[in-house]
Image: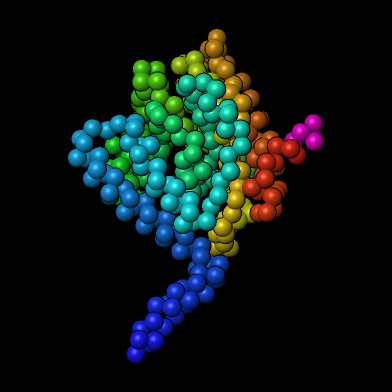
Amino acid sequence: MDVLWLLIPVSLVTGFYIVYKIPVVRYYMKYVIFGIILNLGSVFYTIVFLVRGKPSFSNSSEALPLLRISQWALGLRPKIYGLENCYKFRQCVYVVNHQSFIDAVALCDLWREPSSTIVKDALRFYGLAWPLMHFMRILPIVRNDHTKAMATMREAAEMVKHEHVNMFIFPEGTRNSSGQLLPFKKGAFHLAIQAQIPVVAIVISCYNSFLDHKNKVFEDAAYGVYVLPPIPTEGLTSADAGNLLEQSYAAMKEIFDITATATKDELGLDLRENLRQEH
């Protein structure tokens, strides 16, 4: 009888392991696991921050273990290249390409106080994280309402100017898994120019070699996250926003395109070496 009771958990674990090896099962299970971690963690931290009673930028740093646990659970190993560029200036506007919900786990090692970001307002329908975002002072934006969107950007500008916040912005404006960068919107670049602080571009490697929504594949992977050299904005005016956008886009596209053609085994390597060889 004792042996039988021992066999039951062993059989369950073995069965789960075998089923988890099926790509389509693993694809859905990873998203379920990610959702469970974020929702349970959001409830916990929301209660903690509610007791304190005041939204704070420091709350976002305190909640970062949620993303680090998610990294481990999803089998993701983002490798930061160019980390020194993140700290050359006390305050920056970070522009980041946007492919998936999992982008957040790639940024947790780059987040520093005080920081905030702008997320789409529709996220309030996706789970229990919305109250937590309030306590972390993350800004929601209604992208299909120009008046409300501009109000959010003005609020972001006030944060940057008066509270010296680092702002993480996804200038593509929407998730994109096409394997190519979408055109950028100008908001982040106007914001940086208004505050006269540098733009730092962050390129998250293309996921397509390990994450395929069409074929329901989500593999464990190491992948590069590239922090590019800061682009100064001192002396620039709003008329220069277009040029600043184009400069940032060109630098990011050069890196992203190389990662889009890399194999999964190559993706965790520093692929900037390929650029140096080409030049």
Q: Is residue 182 left or right of residue 134?
A: right
Q: Is residue 22 above or below residue 118?
A: below
Identity of the residue furthest to the bottom in this view: 1
Relative to 240, say whether 273 is above or below. below
Q: Which is nearer the eye, 237 or 200?
A: 200
Q: Is residue 135 left or right of residue 109?
A: left
- Residue 141 located left or right of residue 203: left
Percent of width and height locating residue 268: 64, 47
Q: Nearer the viewer, residue 173 or 222?
A: 222
Q: Is residue 192 magenta?
A: no
What colour scheme does the image use? Answer: rainbow
> Toward the viewer: 204 or 64?
64
Tell me which residue sits at (39%, 77%) in the image. 9
Residue 142 visible to an observer of this rendering: no
At 57% across and 59% down in the image, what residue appears?
219
Residue 236 position, x and y percent, is 55, 12
- Where 130 falls versus 164 (above or below)? below
At a point 27% along the width and 33% down the height, the residue shown is 55
Give coordinates of residue 271: x percent, y percent: 70, 41
**Start and end of the magenta stretch?**
275-279
Overall secondary structure of the magenta stretch? helix
The image quarter in which residue 241 lies = top right
The C terminus, quarter of image: top right
Q: Nearer the viewer, residue 146 or 250?
A: 250
- 87 over 237 or under it: above or below: below
What residue sits 31% from the left and 48% below the top? 42
Residue 12: x %, y % from top left: 42, 77
Residue 5 visible to an observer of this rendering:
yes
